[in-house]
Image (cartoon, coloured by chain):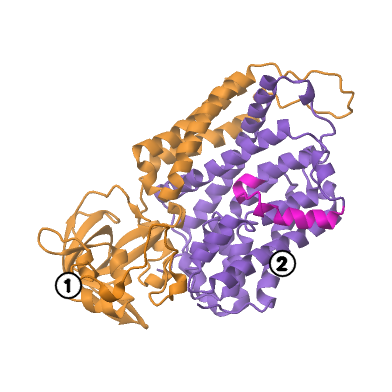
Amino acid sequence: MNHWFWFSASDFAFSFLSVLFEGIPFILIGVLLSGLVDVFLPPRLLARVLPRNPVAGILIGGLLGAVLPMCECGIVVVIRRLIRKGLPLSNAVAYMLAAPVVNPVVAVSTYAAFRGQGPMEIMFWRMGLAFGVAVIVSAIVLALGRAFVLRPDLQTADAHDHGNEHRSAADKAAAAVRSSVGDFLDVTVYFLLGAAVATLFNTSVNQQLVLPLAEDRGMAVASMMVLAGILSLCSTSDAFVAATFTAFPAAAKLAFLVFGPMMDLKLLFIYSLVFRKRFVVALAVGLFVLVWLACTQLPIANFRG
Amino acid sequence: MSHRLLTLLTLLLWGLLLSKFWLSGRIDSYLHPHFHPMVAMAGVLLILLAGLWWWASGRPDGSSHDCGCHYDHEHGPQPRSALSAGTILAFVVLLVPVTAATIVSPGQFGEAAVMNRGIVTDISQLPTFAPPNSGPEDAPPLGADEEIPDVANWPEDKEEGVEYFTRSPDGAIQLETIDLLFAASEPALREEFANQRVTLVGQYVPPRSDDGNFDLVRMIMVCCAADARPLGVKITAPAPTGVDSTGWVRVTGIARFEENGGVFEPRIEGATVEQVEAPRETILY
């Protein structure tokens, strides 16, 4: 088959619905958590409990997924709320980028998927690379500042409690519901747009065309990252798909596993809820370059056993 | 129509949609069973959230106070009442595509998706495949109530190999395409299944050349239909008449295994083909 594009509306609809059904429950968990954070987390509490040293804050943000695991669909709305509540931006970005990978669920699924292909090595490389990339990007975000990175409506953290201390329990519950529903509508619109674009590529583009790229390490890494961006898989399951690309070197599969949960077509849209468009573009390019450099320059062997 | 009502309708539509797919079993073709409870939970939560939204959006905010702040913001998220063009567009995005997709979706993939993903004929290309020669360290951990089987004293009446499978009334071994692909990867299983009469159900993919073969495929997913891959077996038989591309057929014939570039691939020879109803689970897990 030499075609590169073959569209079918029924295939699109089928795959599109499956992506929605898989993602919506996680988004729902994210927005419910976000609503509770909005109403019940006192402002400035985060500032009090987090370390004042920004580097320490970034490192903690990068490891937070180990105790507060979130997938990439649900985490954006949570960090939007946490930023409003005063979480330093660089800490939030470290958590956002690392948590979908650096968490126990993904560690187990990666290990299971790569049985026979060096599961322990792949798992540790994946966690380590994701953490490292998240820390580097967060340090750059720290230097860039909020004005370049955040949407204008998020650039000022809430300085006070929006009257929560004056509210009754019922009023607080109502406010949490309104906040959760508002977030659900916001993030679902972006999720739908991203899922539609990803599904179009996923069902209509001939995926066999990437296979000849496996022979050159640089091209293999780049093509697997592009594929991860297009497929927009959930980080809890993407390892099972990556493991099947047996023709590709381990470095390319790692690039797929590190880049995909940080940047894909649906995330391009969802990130626009929090970040300026120019930053989203810069983030996409920066992550691509960083992950490509890491996976082509580091001594990543083809693991076995 | 107000923002409040449109929000209510959106939450209800999504909640009812998820619940209906779960209750009707239609979700089976879309997601791995691990995710089914999540869908059921999300459906119920969204319906509950719709009720809570109607209650919450009708209440006063309850946060009126003189905080003296200088920020230009709302005190607590309030339901927006005016419907701007952007808001209307957002609701169109929230309501129309999912409704249209629900109507259009046939619950299975067609030829375009099968060809774009490429038919898998080598089991090692399959997600979750573990090599047959994996060591004991790769075996899944035993449950608390499980014991290590005594292979040395394996009872003769225990089923294994071809005897593990049920047979059709005419004696053919009932298999899935994945079973034949797995058998092809193992010398002992190849020997056992070769020249056996087998019967498989799958989707018919029309011939792509004049070699007298067509493909019988069955999709298999890891998480959801979006990651499903078509597993194919070559069928040597005339193309069935009156069967649409990716329509469901039962194929019965003799299993053979042929080496192709170092990989053994299964093929069914002398096959008879009959059209059948689509199975409940159009995609295997």
Magenta residues span A53-75
Closer-to-camera residue (B52/A51) = A51
Q: Quadrant of the C terminus of chain B?
A: bottom left
With respect to residue B226, does B255 lie above or below? below
With respect to residue A261, does B210 lie above or below? below
Callouts 2 and 1 on one subunit = no
Numbered mark located on residue B196 in the image: 1
Q: Chain of mark 2?
A: A
**Residue sitting farthest toward the left:** B170
Q: Amino acid at mark 2?
A: Leu
Q: Which residue is identified by label 2?
A: A290
Left or right placement of residue B217 versus residue A183 in this view:
left
Chain B is shown in which shade?
A: orange
Closer-to-camera residue (B84/A262) = A262
Q: Amino acid at mark 1?
A: Gln
Left or right placement of residue B126 versus residue A251 in this view:
left
Q: Position of residue A141 (x, y in %)?
A: 80, 55
Chain with purple colouring: A
Left or right placement of residue B252 versus residue A223 in this view:
left
Which residue occupies 69% across, 22% down?
A: A169
Task: Inspect the magenta stretch and tell me whether residue A198 lies in it.
Answer: no
With respect to residue B164, does A144 lie above or below? above
Q: What whole-number distance in Å separates the C-alpha atoms at marks 2 and 1? A: 54 Å
Q: Position of residue B162 (x, y in %)?
A: 21, 69
